[in-house]
Amino acid sequence: VDGVFRRLNREVWVVTAADTDRRGGLLATYVSQASLDPAAPMVLIGIAANHFTRDLIDASQGFAVHLLCPDQTDVALNFAIGSGRDRDKLANLSVRRGATGAPLLRECLAWMECRVGGAYDAGDRIYYWADVTDGQALSEDAPLCEHELMAAASEEQLQALRANLAHDIQVQRPMIEAWRRRAGS
């Protein structure tokens, strides 16, 4: 099954959020359009239950999603490696505060600011449905995608990504197993 998922070359999305004096962000597992109506745009995101950005989204009920330009692999890796509990991932980036309080990257392909309308706890992921309250495309380029990000990563960065993945699987596996038991599957 893993080989099937590895064939996908999904866009790389950065999700940012803030609450009072705390801010953070991550590379999201899942971001998708959730409404076909351009007058009422919505997104659906999946965020790991154990991640700092999840705490910020829950506290603020707002977040921003960003598509990155193909040459922003360093920005993507910054958000992919490590935890916002340990360092400010936005410290060396040009950002502004959006209406929801979410940090908006000034340099990216496109961004959308969102207000949470509902959430579903699926064990290892929390899925948030959110209204898009603002957004802007800053470039006509194609977005950075996963395969290109991985090809640009150094061996040291790949090792850090593998270590993060192994840690997340170890932490999240019991969460998804508990959810499956509760759901009766």
Image (cartoon, rainbow, N blue to C red):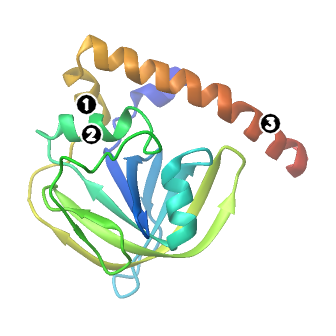
Mark 3 residue element: helix
**Which residue is located at x 40 percent, y 73 percent?**
114
Give, as a three-letter code, the residue at label 3. Glu
**Which residue is located at x 58 percent, y 31 percent?**
168
Give, as a three-letter code, the residue at label 2. Ala
Label disc, if present, on residue 177 of the rendered structure: 3
Disc 1 to disc 3, how far (Cα)? 30 Å
Instruction: Classify residue 66 as left or right of residue 163.
Output: left
Residue most toward the bottom? Answer: 39
CA neighbours of label 2 inside 10 A, class few (<14), some (14 to 19), many (20+): many
Disc 2 to disc 1, how far (Cα)? 8 Å
**Quadrant housing residue 146:** top left
- Read off the residue under disc 1: 149
Disc 2 to disc 3, how far (Cα)? 30 Å
Tell me, yes or no, if residue 1 can be seen here: no
**Which residue is located at x 15 percent, y 47 percent?**
69
Q: Residue 15: percent from the left, percent from the top?
A: 38, 55
- Read off the residue under disc 2: 76
Q: Residue 64: percent from the left, percent from the top?
A: 35, 65
Q: Is residue 57 above or below residue 163?
A: below
Tell me, yes or no, if residue 47 can be seen here: yes
Quadrant of the drawing holding the C terminus: top right
**Which residue is located at x 19 percent, y 35 percent?**
73
